[in-house]
Image (tube, grey):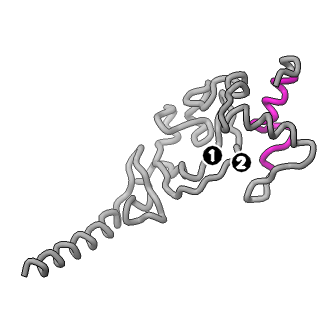
Amino acid sequence: MKRRIFSIVLAALVIYSSQAFAGSCATEGKQFSSIYKNRYPEHCCAGLTEWQAGMDTRISIADKCYKTGMASGFPVGICINCGNGICERNETVCNCPQDCHDGEHSTYQTVESFCKDQSVQGGAKCKAVIKQRRREEIQGADGTVVFQSGDDMCAVCEQYFKNEGGKR
C-alpha cells in the first residue's frame, strides 16, 4: 500500500514538474529556454526581449560590441526590458544598444584595459591572433570572418600596440 501511494505521488510530481512552465512566461531578469521546457518557461512575457545569453559570447569595450569567436552553447536565455531608456542589470551595448551607452555595463571600460588584460578573453588571446592574422583568417561557425584586420576586438589591440610603440 505504501509503495502504491509513493508511486502515485511520484507520478504526480513528474507530471507537475513537466507542466510547471506550460503556458507561463519568464519575467524580467528570469531565465527561459525552448530546449529545457521542463526547467524554464519557453518564452519571456510580453514586452520583454529574449536575450540568448547562453549563446552570446560577445564582449563590449566602452560603447562598442565585438564578436569573440569563443565557443558557446548553453541554450538558456534571460529576459531583459530593452527599449525603456534605462541600462538595467543584464543589459549591455551588445544586447541592448538603445538603452546602454557611455560604457554602461561594458565588459571593459577602455581599449587599454582590454588589451592589457591577460585572460583568455582579453588581450592575451588577441596577441596570438595578431601574430597569425597574416597567415589566415579565423572564421565563425556561420562563415563570417571573426578576426580580420579592421573593426574587431583584436584589431583594436593591434592599433593600440602600434600606438604604444610596439609593446606586446
Q: Where is residue 142? Give x, y as percent.
A: 74, 59
Please identify the residue farthest to the left as the structure is shown.
1
Q: Nearer the viewer, residue 21 or 167?
A: 167
Quarter of the picture containing the C terminus is top right
Q: Where is residue 166? Give x, y as percent.
A: 88, 22
Q: Where is residue 112? Give x, y as percent.
A: 72, 22
The residue drawn where x is 63% and y is 24% is 109
The residue drawn where x is 79% and y is 30% is 156
Q: Residue 126: within the magenta? A: no
The residue drawn where x is 48% and y is 65% is 35
- Name the kind of residue labelled 2 in the image: Gly
Specify the quadrant of the image occupied by residue 67. Answer: top right
Check the image and report above or below for 37 versus 150. below
Query: Contact (CB < 8 A) between labels 1 and 2?
Result: yes
The residue drawn where x is 47% and y is 42% is 81
Q: Nearer the viewer, residue 150 or 49?
A: 150
Q: Is residue 154 left or right of residue 109?
A: right
Residue annotated with mark 1: 57
Q: Nearer the viewer, residue 129 or 66?
A: 129
Q: Is residue 3 left or right of residue 111?
A: left
- Look at the numbered disc 1 and give the secondary structure of its residue: loop
Q: Is residue 151 left or right of residue 60?
A: right
Q: CA distance from mark 1 to mark 2?
A: 7 Å
Badge number at residue 18 = none
- Name the kind of residue labelled 1 in the image: Thr
Residue annotated with mark 2: 69
Q: Residues within 10 Å of mark 2 (few under 14, many from 20)?
A: some
- Look at the numbered disc 2 and give the secondary structure of its residue: loop
Q: Which span of residues is magenta-colored? A: 145-162
Q: Residues within 10 Å of mark 1 (few under 14, many from 20)?
A: some
Specify the quadrant of the image occupied by residue 43. Answer: bottom left
